[in-house]
Amino acid sequence: ALPIFPAQAMQKARQLQNHPSSEVAAMVAKIYSQFGDDTDQPYFEDQLTKLPDYNRYTIIDSYGFFLSRMYKPDVILKGITTLANIAITDHNWWIRLVATQQLAFVKDVLSDVYQTQDAVNQTIAIHGTPDTTSAGQFQEILSLLSGKLEKIKNTETDERLLQQYKNL
């Protein structure tokens, strides 16, 4: 495998973020998901409104990973809202599935990261910005995620998805 150089990858992604190719968009999203910060969220939100379904699938997958790395409540909440809306309203069952899976992934990762107050304090020490998620805010986000996942399960009518959702 080739070594990854985050700074160079981010520089190239920023140069290519307005490229019209949906394949390039998916590559940029993958880089942002691994190395980007909260300023890259608008890229995901924008791409989800204009790409064809196949490419939206990969953007949703990358967006979930991106959100699982974020620490600012407004960024996490915006992404949760977007993915939940897709999971409930998209006409393609497989797009609804990946959006739901990514919400469950974000919930699992955030639950693991913030299991204890010590983990929250360590995260704040590392990322210490004033708008870093506090323990109380974090519990609200986890509660919201649980509620969104329940709503998705309760509104879904496709039997294939209902089977998949039993394990969430």
Image (cartoon, rainbow, N blue to C red):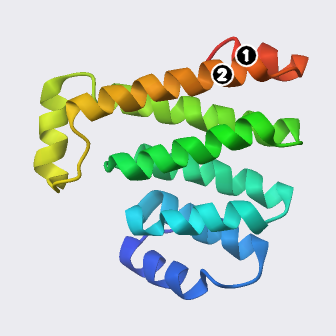
**Numbered disc 1: secondary structure:** helix
Pinpoint residue 59: horizontal percent, then vertical percent.
67, 57
Q: How many labels does the image show?
A: 2
Q: Relative to 65, does residue 117 appear above or below in the rendering?
A: above
- Image quadrant where residue 102 sits: top right
Q: How far apart are marks 1 and 2 (CA)?
A: 5 Å
Residue ID at (46%, 58%) = 34
Pinpoint residue 70: horizontal percent, then vertical percent.
37, 50
Out of 68 and 27, give the one closest to the viewer.
Answer: 68
Q: Is residue 95 left or right of residue 83?
A: right
Residue ID at (67%, 33%) = 100
Callouts 1 and 2 close, C-beta under 8 Å: yes
Q: Is residue 36 left or right of residue 64?
A: left
Category of crowding for the residue at label 1, using alpha-carbon neighbours closer than 10 angstroms: few (below 14), some (14–19), many (at least 20): few
**Numbered disc 2: secondary structure:** helix
- Image quadrant where residue 30 sits: bottom right
Category of crowding for the residue at label 2, using alpha-carbon neighbours closer than 10 angstroms: few (below 14), some (14–19), many (at least 20): some
Residue ID at (57%, 69%) = 43
- The type of residue carrying mark 2 is Lys
Pinpoint residue 147: horizontal percent, then vertical percent.
54, 22
User: Which numbered tag is attached to residue 69?
Assistant: none
Q: Relative to 82, does residue 164 appear above or below in the rendering?
A: above
Per the image, the residue denoted by label 2 is 151
- Image quadrant where residue 68 sits: top left
Per the image, the residue denoted by label 1 is 154
Residue ID at (54%, 88%) = 15
Q: Relative to 81, does residue 59 appear above or below in the rendering?
A: below
- The type of residue carrying mark 1 is Asn
